[in-house]
Image: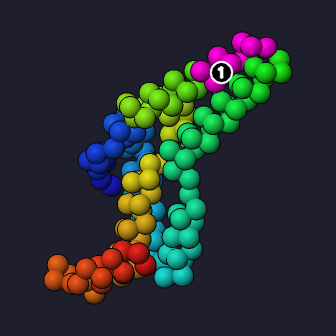
Amino acid sequence: METGTVNIKDRVRENTPENRNIKMDAALMERLKKYRNLSIYEINLRLKKLEKEWDIERALEVNASSLAISGIVLGTIVSRKWFLLSFFVSVFLLHHGVQGWCPPIPVLRAFGYRTRQEINEEIYALKAIRGDFDNISSTSEPFDLLASLRR
């Protein structure tokens, strides 16, 4: 089995320990090997599941907004000190927006959350296995190219 990571330009991957990226890439490679030998129906089921998969950005946004709202509610009802929770969550979210990293990212990656690009790579690899791109070439009309990608 090949080791290492595919060179993807992604701020979350760049700020994720290399061993975590390697594990996530290896798991993807194993899934692709498995689906290469499965039916179109099974590939379609996996694609439907991937369309619903939350990427790390969505998980972070839901997590941060939930904590920020909790800090505001608790700051209003219990103690003004709880407003600090909203403040720190906002700082972490700002840092993530600028830098691509914040404290929850390693935890979310450990739980298996992937970037949108990582999820899309699996989607396009499965579509290629399914044969979606067999009838297109560099001379295909733009409409046909886009239609193949959107299938």
Tell me the kind of residue under disc 1.
Leu
Q: Give the position of the C terminus as an image quadrant.
A: bottom left
- Reply above or below: 80 against 120: above
Q: Magenta residues: mostly which secondary structure?
A: helix
- Reply above or below: 79 against 89: above
Q: Label 1: state its secondary structure.
A: helix
Q: Is residue 55 inside the magenta stretch?
A: no
Which residue is nearer to you in this view: 147 or 72?
72
Magenta segment: 79-87
Q: Which quarter of the figure has residue 12?
A: top left
Q: Name the residue under label 1.
A: 85
Q: Is residue 81 inside the magenta stretch?
A: yes
Please say whether residue 110 is visible from this viewpoint: no
Which residue is nearer to you in this view: 135 or 83?
83
Query: How many marks do you count on the picture?
Result: 1
Please say whether residue 25 is visible from this viewpoint: yes
- In the rendered structure, the answer to whether residue 120 lies left or right of residue 111 reads left
Q: Which quarter of the figure has residue 117?
A: bottom left
From the top left corner, tell me how far across and down residue 89 is, in percent.
Answer: 58, 26
